[in-house]
Image (cartoon, rainbow, N blue to C red):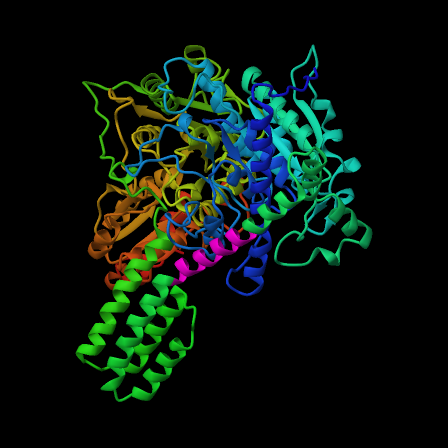
Amino acid sequence: MKAEAKLNDNISFNDFKEQILKDYEIAVISRECSLLGRREVLTGKAKFGIFGDGKELPQLAMARSFRNGDFRSGYYRDQTFMMALDLLSAKEFFHGLYATTSLEQEPMSAGRQMGGHFGTSSLNSDGSWKNLTEQKNSSPDISPTASQMPRLLGLAQASKIYRNVEGIASEKFSKNGNEVAWGTIGNASTSEGHFFETVNAAGVLQVPMVISVWDDDYGISVQAKYQTTKEDISKILAGFQRNEEEAGYEILKVKGWDYTALIHAYENASDIAREEHVPVLIHVTELTQPQGHSTSGSHERYKNEARLEWEKDNDCNKRFREWILENNIAQEEDLKALEKDIKKNVRNAKKEAWEEFLAPHKAAKKTLVSLLENVARNSPNRVFVEKVMHDLIAVEEPLKKDLAATSRRALRYLIGDTTPEKNALLAWINNFMQEMQPKFSSHLHSELPSKATNVSELKPSYVGEPEEVDGRIILRDNFDKIFEKYPEALIFGEDSGAIGDVNQGLEGLQKKYGALRIADTGIREATIIGQGIGLALRGLRPIAEIQYLDYLLYGIQLMSDDLSTILYRTVGQQKAPLIVRTRGHRLEGIWHSGSQMGALISLLRGMYILVPRNMTKAAGFYNTLMQSDEPALVIESLNGYRLKEDKPDNLGELRTPIGVVETIKEGTDITVVSYGSTLRIVAKVADELKEVGIDVEVIDAQSLLPFDLAHNCVESVQKTNRLLVVDEDVPGGCSAYLIQQIVEVQGGYQYLDSPAQTLAAKDHRPAYATDGDYFSKPSAEDIFEKIYEIMHEANPSDFPSLR
């Protein structure tokens, strides 16, 4: 089905002419920013630059069709688009280049991301949602190529949910699902799996999404013939084109220098996606990259003279200028005057941004030099302190790093001094570090009173003789309460819908709540995570289910680079409270029994990692998370669904606290910390050790990120003076992290009479079958013997050698 081009005939010729000249002005401003931005990097004022030159015209066309409530999920060349929507000024562009640590001056990320990474603010200062339907929205960019695509899928699907699911309070998020999610990507990045997975998923889901492919025939230095079959992404995606009988995509192809064709294409795409909820791909060809890929190199190294000449002739700004003159929309002298003013204004914006960036540094430098002068005057190491001071004076354009490093180096020459001048310097250093560090470290997690770690515990309650049921029943009935209580909650994943997940933890819920809220997906973990991110960015409460913990590796890049950094990289301006649900531990086989917790702990800072030992604890974690608005990974114990548990009578209400350990058995001889499925084995062994006179204190970690905020583990170690951490990750993985937390962070080293030890799985991945599990992961006998060995070393007379 091909759509006919539509012209906007609701404006007069003068208005149309004014729009064209405004577009040209923005194109020239953006180009001038790119040119000056490159120079700022090459002169050392900025660290790196990657710009949108050569892509100005299609971005202007996209901006024309972008409406309030719409969302962008793009990449680092979309500066013209942001400028066209008045979401980025030239001065803000340069503040981003310089990494100014002020949201007022650099509203995208306060210097936390390199220039070219854009986003808007979705939240009020109290963490509540702004009315996203009254503003134009951009999700926060990330650098890894094509990683913006899976999130785009969720941003688009949100419109479908809002249009078709009743009962959701959608006033701030959608107007009947009429919003479009706009994605942008370079032609070479369409080679990534994330792109193809997203394209396929959006075609299946039929969501209002428009993908623009900016095609300049290169990917860094590599030509399209090495990137894409047939050198043409729209050609190889032709099978996705919808027709009268089959749903699919509308695929449009347009030259990037053809202004009127671009306007028509984007109007058509907007109408199709917005009204019909059909995804659209716009392949924008014959674009250029006048300054090459980035400031890391010159494109003259890999483009021949003929290509360079072609790019000069077909530069979209040049062709746009020629079209304006040919159609008598403006005269040559008018454009020259406009261009002259723009160059001057952009230079002034650059100058003002640099001066504003330097101003607080220069003021702090002046104060610090005065303090160093004072402290040097009476110091026996005066000559050394003055050398440090003069080195700072020589730095005409100081950075925060220069101030911090200089002041701290000076302290080396003041060891033993007790003068008031030294105390004044110390106070300045402490204040400076206290003020500066949050500019780079804040908002890893929520800093609001509603944060998940502030949600209080509500223990499970039981009336009379509790019913003993399979653990899956507790999860199922708790999810039932969640979906009843929160209309905005939804869950999706492989086998999550019709059969109620592989372990029947969602049994019967699709029939009750519908296929949009309890949904099956294809086998595509990356876009399952991406769906969740996009849905969460638009005010919904998604639970993305990954069938097994091992399969989480398909989506880990998105969880690490995107989800876990959203709050941080926007400095609290956007949030994505996605819950990722999976199951793992203690099954059989290399790819169904992994416990890659050490990797997850390293890669997912910014998310909560929760490891409940049973399904009652898991249900409590879901309830806690639903009362907050932060992302988390919940790992259910795979071998626990059929184990019997007492069924609480307060499902949907009980809450497991985050960052709190639980002592499940008190003891006096040794503290053993574990979690998940292994915790059950530890508890059983602790009972067996009583028979040989060893009294074990068993602590369930419950949550790994964060871990034991109240430092209860060190209180246990203070009593027992011995510590063993048991888990089924590889040696040096999660168990090493927990030892570091207890011994170093909590100060447990000072109470140990024996070395803190770990017992983990073997270095290899777990082998198949019951024997494979026994000889791969810590067994009951391994745990028994390890604890006995520790006690034997401490007291060989009471605990003779076991073997």
Q: Of 465 and 278, which appears nearest the observer?
A: 278
Residues in magenta, as a range: 343-358
Tell me if residue 31 comes above or below residue 770 in the rendering: below
**Location of the C terminus (image quadrant):** bottom left
Please indicate whether residue 698 sits to the left or right of residue 180 in the image. left
Please indicate whether residue 73 sits to the left or right of residue 668 in the image. right
Quarter of the figure with residue 260: top right
Tell me if residue 740 comes above or below residue 251 in the rendering: below
Q: Residue at (67%, 20%) from the top-left corner?
A: 5
Q: What x and y, as percent, mark residue 637? A: 41, 33
Q: What x and y, as percent, mark residue 762? A: 50, 50
Tell whether position 344 is magenta. yes
Q: What x and y, as percent, mark residue 624? A: 30, 31
Tell whether position 590 is magenta. no
**Location of the N terminus (image quadrant):** top right
Residue 639 visible in the current orientation: yes
Report how many numbered discs are placed on residues in the image.
0
Q: What x and y, as percent, mark residue 633? A: 41, 37
Residue 517 visible in the current orientation: no
Q: Residue at (63%, 20%) from the top-left corner?
A: 7
Q: Of 605 and 594, which appears nearest the observer?
A: 605
